Image (tube, rainbow, N blue to C red):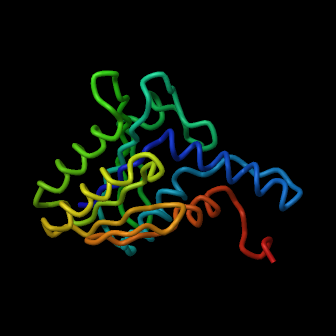
């Protein structure tokens, strides 16, 4: 089994930033992102290859956030909780979790990573988190998971230092999901 953990508020923040910048650069509107395509790109960047895989996707968000603003599907309660889709990479089961005021999002995400790392059937853990605010916590959790034999990938907007995990640039998968072609950038 594979696991993708997403700070949904951060994902929307980065998507908005990319949309604003690319609309100016490309002189055209950038469409709403295809969430399933984005998940596929994250899975591929995280090392998954075509086959019959099981992947859980967890969207962690503020309690007052009802859905993603720049992706479809978007609603946490009706479209991203207890939903699934299947394609050439296997089946992806999606769930969303609101972070209540009794715990910080950083601590909640770290606890989820620790839970996934303790499960024997989990092979890969892919993490999309706010590295501007939670880098030390997420890197520590990623390193602990790696020490338990998990293949861990952190998705960031800028390179980071650390050991025990792979790193991929988040912007590439977002550009693909938003319909921005590399040929448009030349």
Q: Position of residue 100 (x, y in %)?
A: 34, 23
- Image point (47%, 57%), residue name: 39
Instruction: Decide which of 62, 103 is in the foreground and name it.
Output: 103
Toward which corner of the image does residue 167 lie, by quadrant? Answer: bottom left
Residue at horizontal 72 percent and vertical 50 percent from the top: 19
Which residue is the extreme one toward the right? 27
Q: Is residue 62 above or below residue 33?
A: above
- The image position of residue 4, as x and y in percent, is 35, 54
Given residues 73 and 161, the one toward you in this image is: 161
Q: Quadrant of the C terminus?
A: bottom right
Left or right position of 101 against 42: left
In the depicted view, which residue is nearer to us: 166 or 163? 163
Above or below, 101 against 82 in this view is above
Q: Position of residue 134 (x, y in %)?
A: 38, 47
Residue shown at 30% from the left, 65% from the top: 53
Asked which quadrant contains residue 161, the reply is bottom left
At x 30%, y 56%, the residue is 3
- Give residue 183's position: percent from left, percent from top: 77, 76
């Amino acid at each position: 089994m594979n696991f993708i953990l997403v700070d949904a508020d951060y994902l929307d923040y980065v998507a908005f930033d990319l949309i604003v910048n690319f609309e100016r650069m490309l002189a055209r509107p950038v469409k709403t992102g295809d969430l399933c395509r984005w998940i596929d790109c994250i899975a591929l960047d995280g090392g998954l290859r075509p086959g019959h895989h099981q992947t859980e996707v967890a969207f962690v968000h503020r309690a007052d956030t009802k859905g993603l603003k720049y992706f479809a599907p978007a609603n946490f309660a009706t479209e991203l909780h207890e939903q699934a889709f299947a394609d050439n990479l296997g089946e992806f089961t999606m769930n969303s979790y609101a972070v209540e005021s009794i715990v910080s999002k950083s601590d909640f995400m770290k606890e989820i990573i620790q839970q996934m790392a303790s499960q024997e059937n989990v092979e890969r853990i892919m993490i999309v988190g706010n590295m501007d605010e939670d880098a030390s916590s997420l890197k520590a959790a990623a390193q602990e998971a790696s020490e338990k034999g998990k293949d861990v990938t952190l998705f960031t907007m800028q390179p980071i230092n650390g050991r025990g995990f792979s790193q991929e640039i988040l912007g590439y998968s977002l550009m693909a999901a938003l319909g921005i072609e590399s040929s448009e950038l030349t």
